[in-house]
Image: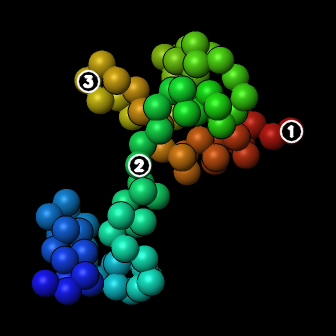
Amino acid sequence: MSGRLADSLRLADIGLDPSWSLRFERSRSITDVMSDYRLLTADEVADMLGVKTEWVYDRARRGELPHVQLGRYKRFRRESIIEWVEEQEH
């Protein structure tokens, strides 16, 4: 199976429109595309922001920091954190 067809099949398997990949991501593999959507841990967000992990959990718990709740886990979208930081700028 060719790489591009395999990538399309894997995109379809996870509910993404395979044509999206072909239209916008012609030169990237499925691994590259999906790494853009990988959720970050609180430790990774803390490193990104230069704060303690406890601060990240506290702000997420208060509803001040955007996050995704996955059962008992909190995960963070890189794009949402970047947008949040930009909104904090005075």
Of label 2 and label 3, which has the lower sequence position? 2
- Does the CB distance between marks 2 and 3 fall below 8 Å? no
Q: Which residue is mark 1?
A: 90
Task: Determine the residue positioned at 55% across, 51% down.
Answer: 79
**Camera-nearest label, 1 or 2:** 2
Looking at the rendered structure, which numbered label has been put on residue 71? 3
**Is 30 positioned to the left or the right of 79 in the image?**
left
Residue designated by label 2 = 38
Q: Earlier in the sequence, mark 3 or mark 1?
A: 3
Could you tell whether 80 is left or right of 19 in the image?
right
Q: Position of residue 56 (x, y in %)?
A: 58, 22
Distance between the Cα atoms at labels 2 and 3?
Answer: 17 Å
In front: 2, or 76?
2
Side of 9 where 66 appears, left or right: right
Instruction: Identify the element where label 1 is drawn.
Output: loop
Tell me where residue 39 sits by quadrant: top left
* Amino acid beneath label 3: Gly
* Residue 85 in the image, given as x and y percentages of width and height: 70, 40
Point 65% across, 17% down: residue: 52
